[in-house]
Amino acid sequence: MDDASDDHLMQAYAAGDAVAFERLYARHQAALYRFVRRLLGTAAATQADEVFQDTWLRAIQARHSWQAQGASFRTWLFTLAHHRAVDCLRKSGRETSMEGHDDGEAPWEPEAAPWADWPAANTQSEDRAFWRAAGHKLLDCLDALPVAQKAAFLLQHDDDLSVADIAQALGLGFETAKTRLRYAMAKLRTCMGAYLPARVDAR
């Protein structure tokens, strides 16, 4: 059972094997919750548990009709979570459109590469504090992204989906998905560069 594919586990669960579902849940619950929590952001953080649980409920309800048709189980699961999170944001008035306002324009790039001169992390306490601060600031910068761009970024960088899988999960064309990723990365780099400029090493 531990070596079974997601597709096999979902088929086994649809046939009545409850252990198969337990294995699917154990395999994906941490990544799914992280995706939901970060997609909702701080403004809707209190609804993360509801969206997470409702995503699994929808997966359970769809077990008899689910078919492996191009998308992996993981991509399908994250698609359910994405739709549920967007519904949640729209109902709360925090997100009125999932269309990126700049999707039709040439991708913007920062003027410089803010990461270029940053020191490598090591075991010294000052460097640990530096990278801890960088991690906190990255989450702040991520929270400020438009939801459409944030979703694309999270699916690639947190969950290692390909651009093609991201496009399928978000219901986008391939080029639109790629453009949103480029915008997200450019904005994050600029945000990080503005708040955490290169540090001069005195040694």
Image (spheres, rainbow, N blue to C red):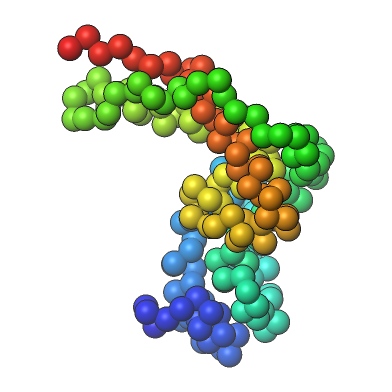
Left or right of 170, for residue 181:
left
Name the quadrant of the C terminus.
top left
Q: Nearer the viewer, residue 49 or 170?
A: 170
Give the image quarter of residue 127. Answer: top left
Q: Residue furthest top?
A: 202
Q: Quadrant of residue 40?
A: top right
**115 left or right of 175 in image:** left
In percent of width and height, residue 85 lies at 69, 50
Residue in the foreground of this view, choosing between 100 and 123: 100
Q: Is residue 69 above or below residue 119?
A: below
What residue is drawn where x is 48% and y is 55%? 160
Residue 174 in the image: state x and y as whole percent: 68, 55
Residue 89 vertical placement versus 166 (above, below): above
Residue visible at 41% across and 31% down?
135
- Residue 5 appears in the picture as rendered: yes
Along the horizontal axis of the image, is 117 left or right of 168? left
Rendering coords of residue 78 (x, y %): 60, 60
